[in-house]
Image (cartoon, rainbow, N blue to C red):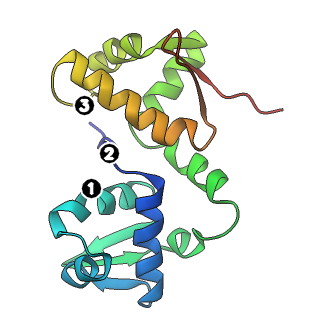
Amino acid sequence: MHKLFPPGVGVTQIRGLVNILRDNSGKLEMSKLAEESDEEVDDLLPIIEASVLLGLARTGGDAVALTEDGKKFASREVQAMLRAKIVSVEPFKSVIAILGERKSATTHDLVVLLHGKKNLYRGGADEAAEQLRNVLLHWGVRVKLLSYNLKGDAWSMKRYV
């Protein structure tokens, strides 16, 4: 089973982490990172996990370091870079496969289909749907990978010409 993208982590938080690491030669101990970011280590863990899943950072021992892609993250093409990265991270990978077959699906449809693949957030169906919707909105829509129709609660792939 693949690791799921942590719910509640936003692009701005990832940028903040990357900027702090960049300002400190690309590597910091977690305690120093917590101090620099003015966050508790426990609050930083999902941000670090998301950064690792996206290939922007790596962890070793008590330190977090930027990868080569993490060092390039501040470039103008952040949106395209993130779009290319999230397609291999769950639940985006499975959602893309589902939407490739079905063209569109509601959040409820996605929850049911992802549950069968064991690529779903914990909690009841409503809680899982809310977490999935939030992650897809904050990342999939933001990087222009997915489109969302609020009225029908329907997801589709963003088309590029």
Label 3 – label 2 distance at C-alpha = 12 Å
Residue at 31%, 40% (x, y): give it.
2
Q: CA distance from mark 3 to mark 1?
A: 14 Å
Q: Residues within 10 Å of mark 3 (few under 14, many from 20)?
A: many
Q: Give neighbour class at mark 2: few <14, some 14-19, many 20+ (Cα, 10 Å).
A: few
The crowding category of the residue bearing disc 1, from other C-alpha atoms within 10 Å (few below 14, some 14 to 19, many at least 20), is: some
User: The C terminus is located in which quarter?
Assistant: top right
Dots 3 and 2: beta carbons under 8 Å? no
Q: Position of residue 55 (x, y in %)?
A: 45, 61
Quadrant of the drawing holding the N terminus: top left
- Mark 3 residue type: Tyr
Q: What kind of residue is marked 1?
A: Pro
Left or right, 67 with reference to 53: right
Which residue corresponds to mark 2? Answer: 8
| SS type, badge 3 | loop
Residue for point 30% across, 46% down: 6
List x then y, in percent, for residue 112. 32, 12
Q: Classify residue 35 by image quadrant.
A: bottom left
Nearest to the eye among marks 3 and 2: give it: 2
Q: Does residue 84 lie above or below 45 as drawn?
A: above
Is residue 48 positioned above or below 157 on the image?
Answer: below
State the mark number for residue 121.
Answer: 3
Residue 45 pos. (x, y %): 23, 61
**Where is 106 relative to 142, above or below?**
above
**Residue 53, position as x, y percentages in the image:** 38, 54
SS at circle 1: helix
Disc number at residue 15? none
Residue that mark 1 sits on:
46
